[in-house]
Image: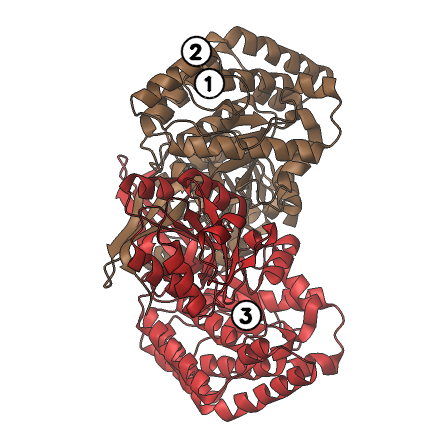
Chain colours: A red, B brown
Amino acid sequence: MTEAPTPRSAVLADKLIAEGLIPADEPAEGGREVPVSPEAAEASGVVDVEAAVHAIADRSRHAARRMARANRAWKDRGLRAIGAALLEGSRQILAANAKDVSAGRANGTSAAMLDRLTLTDARIKALAAALENLATLPDPVGNVMRGQTLPNGLRLRQINVPMGVVAAIYEARPNVTVDIAGLGLKSGNAVILRGGTAAAATNAALVTILRDALESVGLPADAVQTVDQYGREGANALMRARGRVDVLIPRGGRELIQSVVANASVPVIETGEGNVHIFLDASANEDMAVEILLNSKTQRPSVCNTVETLLVHSGSTVLPAVAAALRAAGVTLHTDERIRKALPASIETVPATKEDWATEYMDLDLAVAMVDSLDEAVRHIRAWSTGHTEAILTNDLANAERFIAEVDSAAVIVNASTRFTDGGELGLGAEVGISTQKLHARGPMGLTELTTTKWIVQGEGQIRA
Amino acid sequence: MTEAPTPRSAVLADKLIAEGLIPADEPAEGGREVPVSPEAAEASGVVDVEAAVHAIADRSRHAARRMARANRAWKDRGLRAIGAALLEGSRQILAANAKDVSAGRANGTSAAMLDRLTLTDARIKALAAALENLATLPDPVGNVMRGQTLPNGLRLRQINVPMGVVAAIYEARPNVTVDIAGLGLKSGNAVILRGGTAAAATNAALVTILRDALESVGLPADAVQTVDQYGREGANALMRARGRVDVLIPRGGRELIQSVVANASVPVIETGEGNVHIFLDASANEDMAVEILLNSKTQRPSVCNTVETLLVHSGSTVLPAVAAALRAAGVTLHTDERIRKALPASIETVPATKEDWATEYMDLDLAVAMVDSLDEAVRHIRAWSTGHTEAILTNDLANAERFIAEVDSAAVIVNASTRFTDGGELGLGAEVGISTQKLHARGPMGLTELTTTKWIVQGEGQIRA
């Protein structure tokens, strides 16, 4: 890196190098040609956004090489330094956030979006706690996935190594800025962020704090960079920076993800869309069905692992109890004609259309359809599911096995809440997102999913016959 | 599937169902709206290529569901049936191939390309033998990658499942048609093929034989389909069939791969480009250096794991011996000024330009440059490598470790031939290709890399707190 290190970080880096904790820095390969702060970018009137984003990506590549060689102790020190810096800098963060929130309010932003945008002391403390939790997790880097000694004596290992440059495009949720930076750091990557414009002031304050904290422990500040200063054009350049960005993760709603998928030429991991189904088989126990439906629908309606459609076997006798419990919990039931007829008049419903089968409500709404068989349920799921999570409630072993085998989703659940499709719940420690694609990662992504692999082959002169 | 099964396949399928070897077929979900054979397509004058390719992909999805439920014994029976059918149908295949070859000769196709296009009895026998080898390999489907019982009693498994619909776009090499079909079948996928136009007659003959062989053992013929009949437009529609194609594998030269990467909206795995480097460190043993260089360059110059650039440490004393051996083997040495000066006048060289550092010769040519340190070698590799394979020849432990850590390629080799970067050599059994990207698969891809994963969560009423 060409910027002058602060005395503090230089001294610490020298100390860590002397202790053998970190390798000596390598010389910079590229100059810093473009300003990095939004203010400086504005002031300079830079016009070639693509060149500017490429320069950012090249600095990110350089930082990534240093991150890849940082051992766990050092990376965890970085995570804790960031946590401490967020708490120390909370006044500064909250001041920037207040600007974004009041601008959002003036623009008529919805209450739900304002809530996601808003930071508080408690939320900053939660971010610091999440970083502390990350620091306690094992390092995915250097893990030996498989290995053997071949008949010719070659020693073979396939190990996890960092991806390199990880980019993220997300909505106006400042917590994602810290979240992705922490996950990237722990997995030995450098990250390039593009947050929603509505959170620009907050993100700028956060990125400054994150970069200073990294430098304070001798890690490269450029391991966290943003292209927010280049607006939508910057986001486009990031999506098209093939060869410079190793993976791009869009985090947000359907529209954001589809736009990234359609426009990106860099490798993308799709996350999050969840049109989740539960199939209530004829043999399902009533109490279990009521508990699981209530939990899957009402525990946190706005997230992707919440159930959106209930498919009821026509032989089930527990539908009225389930429907009554959901109504009592405030859930609007969008039902087809047969479900309507199977319910007592006292249970209020609204008629469902085809659109309901496709809708991820993310609210206290549930589509309900009747089916005559497991086959019909599977066909409905194939037609409408986003491949995130589907569950069956049953006491029929053959049906459970068939559902597991025939439903092609990232997670298939038998007799439990759909809310368990979550990195934390499934024991991955941290969650990068929930992949709904089949390449690289499927379902909850942990730290290992931010790594790739490298084959290492060691011999003493072996040649191929 | 809507086509009437032949009596033979229907009888066998019934028998296999009765034996419990295979599940009963499910009803078709979509009709067969477009003709599938090139002749029929031509005759019908179909114009909506996108709709036709989507219909093919939808039939492929349907076939993929049946393939996913076929157990190993059944799939291996299919592989052996294909092998036998290729041998039985060799006259028919060779006749179609003769048409392609003579058309190619008339068009002035190069001798090397004609060689790749040409099938012989021996080559057909080799294809059948490769299928027999595939049949002996373990089934990647159903493998439990990880699993545990969570504190709340949920039983968790992450298992390998087929990708679903695998597409391949490749050049006029008919062996790839059989190769991809076999790999797809063994891994429980359905494949959609797009081969080079110059091999159209051969591929049409092969696909017909493959489909008949699948049907003869009760597997869906639509597990192997081609879009060759729709030409370039068909290839484009295949690349853009997002949501219908789970993964697209381009196999061929740089131009083909780059065109697919630039145009595809479906997930792609890049394969094959190999600008491979060997770094000859000062401490490398002379005999070993000579043997490894000869093997890495001359054993099979036209493939991707052949070395293309040799970087020589200025302190090495073995350069003259290495250069003399390579010259004696017919290798043209493209050298920089310092290498030229370090060699006796008796060793012929040609001057290298920057372009040589970027060139994947795939022939008996080698770029040779002198460097003063491991750092300089690593910088050269970072600047010019395609990330396929790099090797170091050294007796210095610290240098070996640094090379392993700092070179960011799919395979890093110490003191062995670069020709070992190969699925067969590294014990993967079969090779789908060599991925040079970081997402999903990196380096030699075996059958497992044609699968994705599924989380299976089993409980007895667990809900999230």
The quadrant holding residue B258 is top right
x and y percent of residue B38 in the render? 66, 20
Which of pointers 1 and 2 indicates the residue nearer the eye?
2
In front: A77, or A313?
A313
- The quadrant in which the N terminus of chain A is found is bottom right
Real-space CA distance between mark 1 and mark 2, rounded to the nearest whole angstrom? 8 Å
A271 horizontally vs A448: left or right: right
Q: Give the chain of mark 3.
A: A
In front: A115, or B216?
A115
Sequence-wise, the earlier of marks 1 and 2 is: 2
Q: Are marks 3 and 2 in contact (CB under 8 Å)?
A: no
Say few, some or many: other residues with alpha carbon within 10 Å of mark 2 (under 14 / 14 to 19 / 20 or more). few
Residue at the spot of label 3: A28
- The quadrant in which the C terminus of chain A is found is top left
Residue at the spot of label 1: B215
Q: Respond whether the residues carrying marks 3 and 2 are from the same subunit.
A: no
Residue at the spot of label 2: B8
Which of pointers 1 and 3 indicates the residue nearer the eye?
1
Residue type highlighted by circle 1: Glu
Say few, some or many: other residues with alpha carbon within 10 Å of mark 1 (under 14 / 14 to 19 / 20 or more). many
Secondary structure under the numbered disc 2 in the rendered image: helix
Residue type highlighted by circle 3: Ala
Say few, some or many: other residues with alpha carbon within 10 Å of mark 3 (under 14 / 14 to 19 / 20 or more). few
Real-space CA distance between mark 3 and mark 2, rounded to the nearest whole angstrom? 69 Å
Secondary structure under the numbered disc 3 in the rendered image: loop
Q: Is residue A336 above or below residue A17?
A: above
Residue type highlighted by circle 2: Arg
Secondary structure under the numbered disc 1 in the rendered image: helix
Residue lying at 69% horizontally and 28% vertically, measured from the top left = B230
